Amino acid sequence: MAMRGAVVAATALMLGGCIPRMEPPTDYGRPAPPPPPLDHGPPTTDFTPHDEAVAAQGTAPTRPVTRVAVPGAAARPLWEARPVEADARSVEASTYVVRPGDTLRGIAERTGAGVDAIARANGIAAPAYVVRIGQRLTIPAGRYHLVRTGQTGIAIARAYGVEWSRIVAANGLEEPYVLRAGQRILIPEAAVAPGSRAAERAAAFRLDVDDILTGGEPALAKNAAPVRPVARPKRPLPATVPVAPPRQLAGGGFLWPVDGRVVRRFGPGRSGERNDGIKIAVPLNTPIRATSAGVVAYAGDGIAALGGLIIIKHGDGWTSVYGHAAKLLVTRGQSVTRGQVIGLSGDTGFADQPELHFELRKGRTPVDPQGQLRR
């Protein structure tokens, strides 16, 4: 599967200093009523909204997309759990003279521009954001969206019909890409005509792995921190609650996720398309194992081409991706150990045969897995 290239990210500007830790919701990790069986009968072939978006771009799949059972799946995808209204404020370029008692945050509130955008335009260092009385600040023009608690970058991008990677670049966002309630982010011009219906803007947005990695976590409430992962969650983590990724990569290197034959290698294909991972042919329902310890950042089937998909963050910027799964055995926010079975292989999505699509990424950059894996 061809993936978009990495967008160069600048320094992330955070809105707070030391923040206390927010514990998981009171029902997270507590026993819940028995969930329905993971197998929900014969696979369906209905397109999801993401499939419709792909079709709108003229790249509809040549065969139906098989849906998979997702443990704890909500009625809406994670990134749409808190809908976003396209209500950005348009700000004209201007100059502001700092007055006694002003703070950069207050100036941003008064002008409607983002704190980090003003800081970048005037060379003001984070996180102190020091301004001086009489200082003349350039207020950059643009459309600024006010982030609300629980909104994700993906949902914001879909609301405006703009690629999330462009928003990442425009705002200099960097790992861990966590937005905060009250933050104002710059929205680049959309690819669709102004005034387009919400459905048309959503159709202009095409989801990929990089979007999930950088825009899949919901925005933090003020004075809050992501929750800690749980090894054996009894109840899925609410979609509007962000989860803390691991900081460091565990020792032991990366394991092969399955034993099988590599049928497609990393890099350019014969017809010029780029493969951001490798394809490993395996029998149906082969156990898929976590390549290293980490935290599940995503488990679902929101990317039509990859079918059943699991994404795990491992720390030190490393991420692993597992696609075409027939069954997912982990949920978002769950901590996993090296070699733990996280799903069963399949031929979901645009798989050519029963196989596993596997990626390793360092930051946002795909890395050839065969140079990193150990038997």
Image (tube, rainbow, N blue to C red):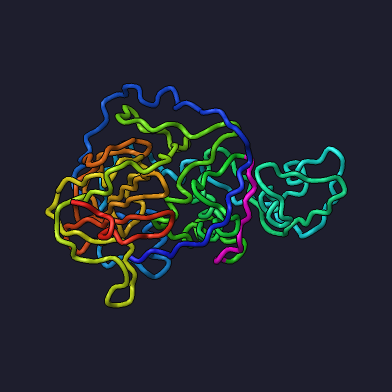
The residues colored magenta run: 182-192
Picture quarter with the N terminus: bottom left
Q: Which residue is drawn at 29% across and 44% down?
A: 292
Image: 220 above or below 13: above
Image: 179 above or below 241: below
Name the image quarter holding residue 263.
bottom left
Image: 253 above or below 329: below
Q: Give the percent coordinates (x, y) of residue 324.
A: 25, 54
Q: Give the percent coordinates (x, y) of residue 17.
A: 62, 36
Image: 88 above or below 237: below
- Residue 93: say if magenta: no
- Position of residue 197 in the picture relative to residue 139 (left or right): left
139, 294: nearer the viewer: 294
307, 176: nearer the viewer: 176
- Position of residue 130 in the picture relative to residue 158 (left or right): right
Q: Residue at x 35, y 41 (%)?
A: 296
Residue 44 shows in the view: yes
- Position of residue 329 in the picture relative to residue 14 (left or right): left
Characterize the magenta stretch by its predominant secondary structure: loop
Q: How many numbered discs sit on the rendered protein?
A: 0
